[in-house]
Amino acid sequence: MAKAKDTKADSGSITAYSVKTKTKNVPMVDPVIDVKSGRYIATGKDSDGNKMAAIMSKATAEEHIKKGNAKKGSGWS
């Protein structure tokens, strides 16, 4: 009985932890990925309008942009 390892890859959208509602894997609405200090940070809002952010690797960020799940923000060269 194997469990699914990562729900991010299954759903295709970027998910993050919501500090306000204290829930995990909340999907972001219209995420934008910025590069700040060499880190790739996706920022967006949840369905209720609360701000969210998630830090990810370069490969993950490029994959989400390629699939159309996110847009490029500032800091990309």
Image (cartoon, rainbow, N blue to C red):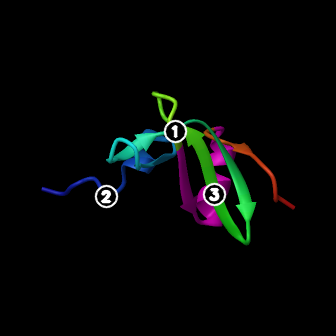
Q: Closer to the camera: disc 1 or disc 2?
A: 1
Residue type indicated by callout 1: Met
Q: Does the magenta stretch include residue 61?
A: yes
Secondary structure at badge 1 equals: loop
Foreground pick, 45 / 20: 20
- Residue located 56% across and 61% down the image: 55
Pointer 3: residues within 10 angstroms few (<14), some, or many (20+)? Answer: many
Q: Which of marks 3 and 2 is nearer the N terminus?
A: 2
The residue at the far bottom in this view is 38
From which residue to which does the magenta span run? 52-68
Q: Mark 3 points at which residue?
A: 41
**Furthest residue in direction left, as rendered:** 1
Q: Where is residue 63 in the image (x, y as percent from the top left)?
A: 63, 52
* Location of residue 73 in the rendering, given as x and y in whole percent from the top left corner: 77, 48
Residue furthest out toward the top? 48
Query: Disc 3 marks which amino acid?
Result: Ile
Q: Which numbered disc covers residue 5?
A: 2
Membership of 11 in magenta stretch: no
**Is 28 on the left or on the right of 70, as rendered?**
left
Closer to us: 37 or 7: 37
Give neighbour class at mark 2: few <14, some 14-19, many 20+ (Cα, 10 Å). Answer: few
Give the residue at mark 1. 28
Q: In this view, does 63 lie to the left or right of 51?
A: right
Residue at 18% x, 57% y: name it: 2
Q: How crowded is mark 1: few (under 14 residues within 10 Å), some or many (20 or more)?
A: many
Disc 3/disc 2 C-alpha distance (Å): 22 Å
**CB within 8 Å, label 1 to label 2:** no
- Please identify the quadrant where the C terminus is shown: bottom right
Q: Nearer the viewer, residue 77 or 24?
A: 24
Q: Is mark 3 on a helix, strand or loop?
A: strand
Q: Which of marks 1 and 2 is nearer the N terminus?
A: 2
Q: In this view, does 2 lie above or below 10?
A: below
